[in-house]
Amino acid sequence: MIKNLGKEALNIEKMDWKQLIVNEKNKTDFESVQIHFKLNQAIPYTVLVDNNMNILAFSVGLSDEIELRKMVKK
């Protein structure tokens, strides 16, 4: 049910970029994603990755459009 709500929110908010939805119930998958992307429970937490899932940049807290554009340009 939560997964469906997540997908619905993505459509409503027009977030058409790639989104990763990881089920916390599967501890192995969740922990590996948490370690790989250096997740730290902060909301919002933005991670910019390349097509190979390598971290290019990240930010903690709310980012405005200017900050996000700077992150993408790096």
Image (tube, helix red, strand yellow):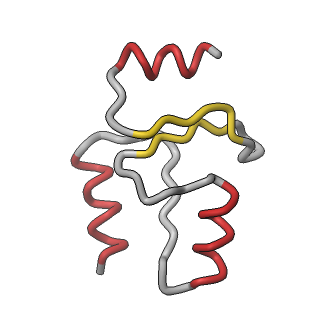
For the C terminus, give its image quadrant. top right
Above or below, comparing residue 5 to residue 65 in the picture? below
- State the image coordinates of residue 18 (x, y, percent, origin top left): 52, 46
* Residue 28 versus residue 50 in the image, above or below: below
Q: Is residue 24 left or right of residue 73?
A: left
- Rendered location of residue 26, percent (x, y): 56, 85
Q: Position of residue 55 (x, y in %)?
A: 69, 40
Question: Residue 5 falls in which quadrant of the image?
Answer: bottom left
- In this rendering, is residue 61 above or below 41? above
Q: Nearer the viewer, residue 52 or 11?
A: 52
- If the image is split into quadrants, where does the N terminus sit? bottom left
Q: Is residue 9 left or right of residue 47?
A: left
Specify the quadrant of the image occupied by residue 6: bottom left
Position of residue 43 measured from the top left corner of the image (x, y, whole percent): 35, 50
Most foreground residue, 12 or 63: 63
Q: At x 58% / y 73%, what residue is drawn?
A: 30
Residue extending furthest toward the left: 12
- Residue at 70% x, 36% y is 50
The residue sitting at 74% across, 43% down in the picture is 54
Answer above or below: position of 56 versus 64: below
Tell me the residue at 51%/69% (across/down).
22
